[in-house]
Image (cartoon, rainbow, N blue to C red):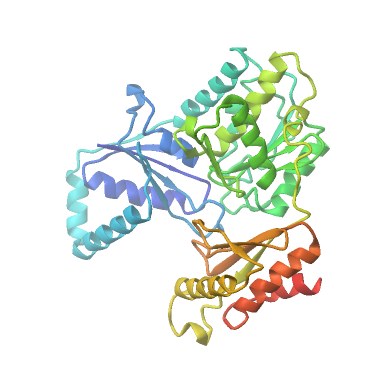
Amino acid sequence: MSVSIGHDSRISASMLQDAVSRGLMSSGVNVLHFGLASTPAMFNSTLTENEEIRCPVDGAIMITASHLPYNRNGFKFFTNAGGLGKADIKDILERASDIYNKVTDDGLQESQGTSSASVRSVDYMSIYASDLVHAVRKAAGNIEKPLEGFHIVVDAGNGAGGFFVDKVLEPLGAVTSGSQFLEPDGMFPNHIPNPEDKAAMRAITAAVLDNEADLGIIFDTDVDRSAAVDSTGSELNRNRLIALISAIVLEENSIGEESHLAIETSGHGALKENHWLDDGAYLMVKLLNKLASARASGIKGGSKVLTDLVEGLQEAAVTTELRLKIDQNHVDLKGGSFRDYGEAVLKHLENVVDSDPKLIKAPVNYEGVRVSGFGGWFLLRLSLHDPVLPLNIEAPSNDAAVKLALVVHEAVREFRALDISSLDKLIHGN
């Protein structure tokens, strides 16, 4: 069997790569080192048909913690059926724990010494990037440099997305001067690599305006999320990105009888045509395809081709996200987990909403409690990684947003381990 391993720019990447490689080799698995890579590329290595680089691999491991702080890290696992889910990960952890409890240092060294497995370094990112280049050329009628004349800047946030400049945009003819933070640096010295982060979006917006670029593109650390900025400095992220990609997909699939797109406001966007993989680079290729095909058809105007697709759509007057932190040391937790406490908060909120005829709870919702009322809505959910309950509110006015915030405030204020100071500020306007 063979398994590919890649990583983002985090400072613990090499240590973890070495450790997981030793573990795999001790079991007789051949290992391919891809080095600095994106999460979507790792999944693609389970599909690529290329005997020269031993692909497709049987499995792939991406070492990343996405947008989380520099001192976090972890593994994402893939087979050609997709990413492993919670049940799979739980099974792996239990098996690993069992093996670890039985292993001895001598036994580990002996198994490593007798292994016939090998490690091979492969430049897979060039292969992955060439597929993206081919997709844009095809959309433009097989023109070699369909982006010639376009000025496009990229902000990689010192993560793994720098390849997009020299391996995708430049071969397509785009001018990329003014691109920034392309060098991998696991300390993320410039801003958090996260298209949802306000400082990150300010950075790419400034780069677009300062360089008078046609388009700006920003990636998260492992490039499974992305966002854009048009030539006027208008952000194409969150709801705007959802609307834009939806418009592009609907142009291509006008029947509308099945889903071709699944996307979150965070910038995770998965397309049916791309194996339902949330790939930030491929999502941006869809925008480039639109630019290139418009240019090939004689349509001018740069990124206006994109913004015209969403111009006139109504946007919420107030859009905000608050993060309600759980104090894990608070006596209310009674030594229990923050997850149990957070779930109790959500359950209580659900009961409060059910008893209020002015509020409508979403009948089907896959994460947290989503409620409509006062012309807007809110969603309170529990973070997957941290002791935090993120609260999203969208409303037609500040008054309506305050009314929605009051609903949540009244429901959760008895949970004393929950920091609701941000809710207080929103309600009292300070």
Residue placed at 52% from the left, 60% from the top? 71
Residue placed at 34% from the left, 30% from the top? 56
Report x, y in % for residue 34: 42, 36
Between residue 104 and residue 144, name the one nearer to us: 144
Between residue 391 and residue 191, name the one nearer to us: 391
Q: Give residue 420's quadrant in the image.
A: bottom right
Between residue 7 and residue 346, name the one nearer to us: 346
Counting the numbered discs, the total is 0
Is residue 227 among the parts visible in the rendering? no
Report x, y in % for residue 206: 79, 43
Is residue 62 among the parts visible in the rendering? yes
Q: Give residue 248's quadrant in the image.
A: top right
Is residue 43 found left or right of 395 in the rendered image? left
Quadrant for the N terminus in the image: top left
Q: Is residue 129 above or below residue 159?
A: above
Report x, y in % for residue 218: 65, 41
Report x, y in % for residue 10: 52, 51
- Looking at the image, the residue that sits furthest to the bottom is 331
Quadrant for the C terminus in the image: bottom right
Q: Give residue 423's quadrant in the image.
A: bottom right
Q: Is residue 391 above or below residue 356?
A: above
